[in-house]
Image (tube, grey):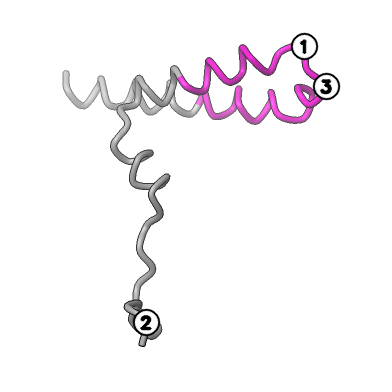
Amino acid sequence: MDASPAGGKKKAGKNRDKANKKSLDEKLKSVQDKSAKMRGTPEAAEKLPKLEAREKRLRAKMAGAAEKKA
């Protein structure tokens, strides 16, 4: 028998665990780094808008978190 429970809750993958541990600052920095590397590449046209949208959401989230602290 395998260790996974039949029809049980699926465990979060390693990457998902890592993502949850990252602070908002770290997430924002990684998105900015990705978009900086992406500029000037052929796939930039399709991926940059998504990265910029994610950056915008993270900034909004950080602003909300800062308001809660204040």
Q: What is the spatial separation of the Cα atoms under label 2 and label 3, in whole angstroms?
A: 44 Å
Q: Residues within 10 Å of mark 1 (few under 14, many from 20)?
A: few
Callout 2–callout 1 Cβ contact below 8 Å: no
The residue lying toward the viewer, choosing from 69 and 5, is 5
**Foreground tag (2 vs 3):** 2
Label 1: element kind:
loop
Residue 45 x/y as whole percent: 79, 24
Marked residue nearer the N-terminal end (2 or 3): 2
Marked residue nearer the N-terminal end (2 or 1): 2
Which quadrant: the N terminus?
bottom left
The residue lying toward the viewer, choosing from 63 and 15, is 15
**Farthest residue in the front direction?**
1
Q: Quadrant of residue 12?
A: bottom left
Residue assigned mark 1: 40
Tell whether position 36 is magenta.
yes
Prevailing secondary structure class for the magenta stretch in the rendered image: helix
Horizontal relation, residue 42 to residue 16: left or right: right
- Name the kind of residue labelled 3 in the image: Pro
Q: Quadrant of residue 7?
A: bottom left
The residue lying toward the viewer, choosing from 16 and 57, is 16
Q: What is the spatial separation of the Cα atoms under label 2 and label 1, in whole angstroms?
A: 48 Å
- Name the kind of residue labelled 2 in the image: Asp
- Name the kind of residue labelled 1 in the image: Gly
Q: Which residue is depicted at the point 44% across and 26% down?
A: 58
Residue 24 x/y as whole percent: 34, 26
Residue assigned mark 3: 42
Magenta range is 30-56
Which disc is residue 18 wearing? none
